[in-house]
Amino acid sequence: MLITFEGIEGSGKTTQIELLYNHLKEKGYEVIKTREPGGTAFGEALRRIFLHENLNVLPLSELLVFMAMRAQHVEELILPALKDGKVVLCDRFVDASYAYQGYGRGIDLGIIETLNRFVTKGVRPNLTILLDCPVKKGLQRKAANVMDRFEKENIAFHQRIKNAYLKLAGEEPKRFLIVDGKKRVEDIETIIRKKVENLLKNYGI
């Protein structure tokens, strides 16, 4: 089973994926935690370069590099884990390309769809958890640390990403779980746990 986490910068994805990972491990599930960009040695090496705050990257170049990392990620880690019956928790996946490079950068969504289908080999999330929070709140959380190239984008860019995620969720309501990112960490964790446990039960896992 593939469960993905999406949301704007500072929405709380990393915290919640860690909490769910630990919970499922304690319950005895075979679970893998991974992320995009990254997830493999190849992807993590590119991530270190790609997120550098002063790097000038054209939108199409950005998309193609992300797709290269995703192709490696799916082939090397995600597909083998799914074939072994493991639960895969992924911090960002295909929806991030539509939100960031599509709605954020203005690249044609049809191009992104074609590339996504090609590199994922048909792998789709069983559940996508969207942590929705105000842009300013998310960026305030990030401001305490060194910000990467995406985090340093202007408010308008991040607002487009937020709106894009809500649009994507509206188009596939059965796949998405939208959670209010302004809630307490513990409350968000409870909502996610309940949804995931019900999903695993329904799949007989």
Image (cartoon, grey):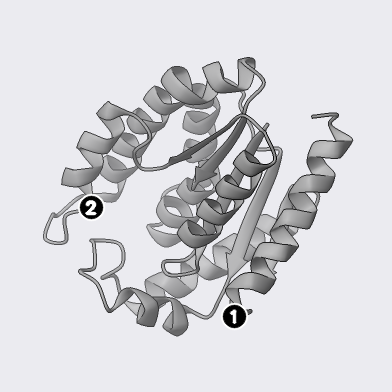
Relative depth, front residue between 157 and 203: 203
Q: Is residue 53 left or right of residue 193?
A: left
- Image vertical order of residue 78 relative to residue 161, above or below: above
* Residue at point 74%, 64% (across, down): 191
The amino acid beneath tag 1 is Lys
> Residue under circle 2?
51
Quadrant assignment for the N terminus? top right
Relative depth, front residue between 60 and 90: 90
Q: Is residue 102 left or right of residue 81?
A: left
* Residue at point 79%, 38% (across, down): 200
Q: Judging from the image, what secondary structure is the residue with disc 2 in?
A: loop
- Image vertical order of residue 20 relative to residue 166, above or below: above
The x, y position of residue 123, in whole percent, is 61, 27
Q: Nearer the viewer, mark 1 or mark 2?
A: 1
Quadrant for residue 81, please give it: top right
Identify the mark nearer the N-term, 1 or 2.
Answer: 2
The x, y position of residue 192, in whole percent, is 70, 58
